[in-house]
Image (cartoon, grey):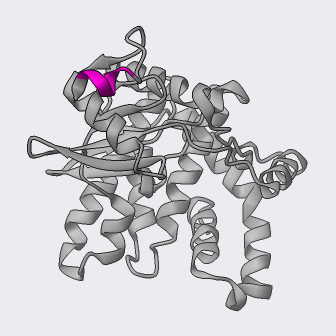
Amino acid sequence: IVAVALCYIPMTTATGDTHLLAQAVRALTRQPASVFAIERNGKRYWVKRPGSDKHKPSHTLLRFVAWLSRIEMLRPTVSRGGQDAMTRELARLERLRGAKFPVPRVAAVGEDFFVTEDNGAVLMNIARTLPEEGRDWLFAQIAQAAGILASMHRQGLCHGRPSLKDIAVKDDRITFLDFEEAPEAVMTTETACLRDVWLFLSSIGRLERKWPGLCAAAWQGYREKAPEALVRRFEEQALRLDRLSALLLKTGGRWFGRDVLGVLHTIRLVAGR
């Protein structure tokens, strides 16, 4: 069975556990999702194949807004999917793992998919369902993630989209997931790092109603380990957004959904208002 399954994987590209590769190939014929879990020998793994182009018209509009306002961290960078996205993600995982950052270990690679070890539940799902008794634990995990992101930036590396749905925790150990995007290809490393911080804090801001103070704790955790110049640059960008956010909150805040209010809260927090 293994030999038959592996016939569909060119041996020049397939690497890793052959039994795991064969199981992944069989699962791919039944699974329409681009990312899904499989179990082998009592362990969970994740199979990932190239996704589709995620570009939307709103991304073009946001790019224009970023250019017009000179707020570089708003500039979007979207995965176009395909084989290039997979190749890019594997290369970034190898680079970050070589730099000793917590990213998934790649267990096997096929022609158009790869398999990683499981790294636990994502922080966004945990935060949305965690009872109040878990407050101290959650704040500690967020601070840990913020510190790791800051250390990454200190070494001139970025994530690309470090929202809480792309950060997992298992046994109190943080792991950053999903490196399809390549912001450095369309912007400077500094801008990519600024964008990292913006996306990280914005995703946390969406939880502010349930977890007051969580965004402030994340920002403090980041500032303690991040390059001072990058922190100052981010604060400058936030100040440019502050006047707009104040106007939006004053004129239409009651009509906004929770996500929008969370993002606006993030802007005003960093701007020191």
Across and down, in percent, residue 145 comes to 34, 47
The one of 156 and 177 positioned closer to us in this rendering: 177
Across and down, in percent, residue 23 comes to 26, 36
Q: Residue furthest top?
A: 12
Q: In this view, does 18 lie to the left or right of 9?
A: left
The one of 16 and 190 positioned closer to us in this rendering: 16
Across and down, in percent, residue 54 comes to 67, 48
> Residue at the location (48% across, 52% down)?
32
Q: Which image quadrant: the N terminus?
A: top left
Q: Residue furthest bottom?
A: 254
Across and down, in percent, residue 36 comes to 37, 50
Q: In this view, does 174 lie above or below 49?
A: below
Picture mark count: 0
Residue 103 visible in image? no
Q: Main secondary structure of the magenta part?
A: helix
Residue 239 visible in image? yes
Q: Is residue 178 left or right of residue 233?
A: left
The one of 212 and 184 positioned closer to us in this rendering: 184
Q: What stretch is highlighted in magenta?
A: 3-7
Q: Is residue 15 above or below residue 261?
A: above
> Residue at the location (76% across, 54% down)?
56
Q: Quadrant of residue 97?
A: top left
Q: Which image quadrant: the C terminus?
A: bottom right
Q: In this view, does 241 lie above or below 209?
A: above
The one of 193 and 48 positioned closer to us in this rendering: 48
> Residue at the location (86% across, 45% down)?
67
Q: Is residue 233 left or right of residue 97?
A: right
